Amino acid sequence: MRTRTERGAGTVPQLFPPWANAATRGALLGAAAVAVAVPAGLLAWVRMPNASGRYAAVPQPVPFAHVLHAGAFHIDCRYCHAAAERSAYAGVPPSATCVPCHDEQWMQSSLMAPVRRSVATGRPIAWRRVNALPDFVFFNHAIHMKKGVGCETCHGRVDRMSRVYQAAPLTMAWCVDCHRAPERHLRPVERVTQMGWSLSDSAQLALGLALVRRYDVRARTECTTCHR
């Protein structure tokens, strides 16, 4: 007959309940799902208008109406953004640029008070940026205009905006798509400021391919094109 010690030899007590294995597998699967879902959700969120600021009208110190100036009066974009053709930055005009366009009655109105104050003191108006790119992104207005990329391609129909807003997503994918096939967006350089440019897909493709050759446009997708 075996002793009690001999009968218990080789028997290992169960430390965890039977459902522990299933719970562990579930926890590991849940952790893996969270590790995938959280970055994916953040990547999707930063592309949404609420995160990028797209379509959000930006209040300005002077209620400048593009719908009136660029729309009704057909003032060329370059009259105010004179640096766009020769500089990386389009720039904003000095306050004195506004004065010749308005009669004395308008200049003495309350709406123009910031302009009068700016002209008198020499301090520029604190305009708020609408289309803001991260500091690690380099964008050159001049090269795009010289290659036939229209202002409305990136800025939208500002001639229809009472208060300007960011019209394009300005994401990396959006920029790269244009760089891969620039012929879809090119127009003659003398039409870059024209609002409402529209051609059929076939006509745009034919014209765009011709302009690619004429302006020596290269499909630049290297990282250093925008990140320098």
Image (cartoon, rainbow, N blue to C red):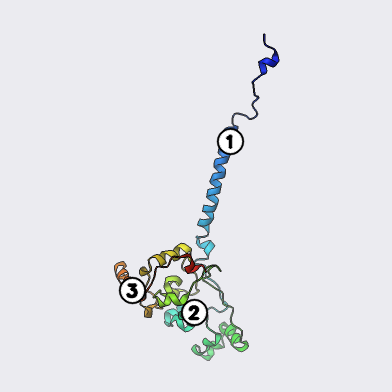
Residue type for callout 2: Ser
> What residue lies at 54% left-to-right and 41% top-to-bottom?
29
Q: Helix or strand or loop: what does disc 1 sit on?
A: helix
Which amino acid type corresponds to the residue marked 3 in the rendered image? Arg
Which percent across, then down, holds residue 159? 44, 76
Q: Which residue carries the number 1 mark? A: 23
Which dot marks residue 131?
Answer: none
Residue 21, quarter of picture = top right
Q: Which mark is first along the chain, 2 or 1?
A: 1
Which amino acid, mark 1? Ala
Residue drawn 45% across and 82% down? 78
Estimate the spatial distance between the alpha carbons at disc 2 and disc 3, rounded to whole Å.
23 Å
Q: Which of 161 and 86 is in front in this view?
A: 86
Secondary structure of residue under mark 2 = loop
**CA gap, disc 1 to disc 2?**
62 Å
Q: Answer yes or no: do the residues labelled 1 and 3 have beta carbons within 8 Å? A: no
Camera-near label (1 vs 3) is 3
- Figure check: 133 above or below 14: below
Considering depth in this image, is 6 or 104 the residue closer to the camera? Answer: 6
Q: Residue 213 carries which label?
A: 3
Position in image of residue 183 (x %, y %): 35, 69
Residue at (56% x, 38% y) in the render: 26
Q: Residues within 10 Å of mark 3 (few under 14, many from 20)?
A: few
Q: In this view, does 174 lie above or below 146?
A: above
Work out whether residue 148 or residue 158 is closer to the camera in this orientation and state it. 148
**Neighbour class for label 2 at 10 Å: few (<14), some, many (≥20)?**
few
Q: How far apart are the two marked residues, 1 and 3, measured between alpha carbons?
A: 64 Å
Q: Name the residue under label 2.
A: 87
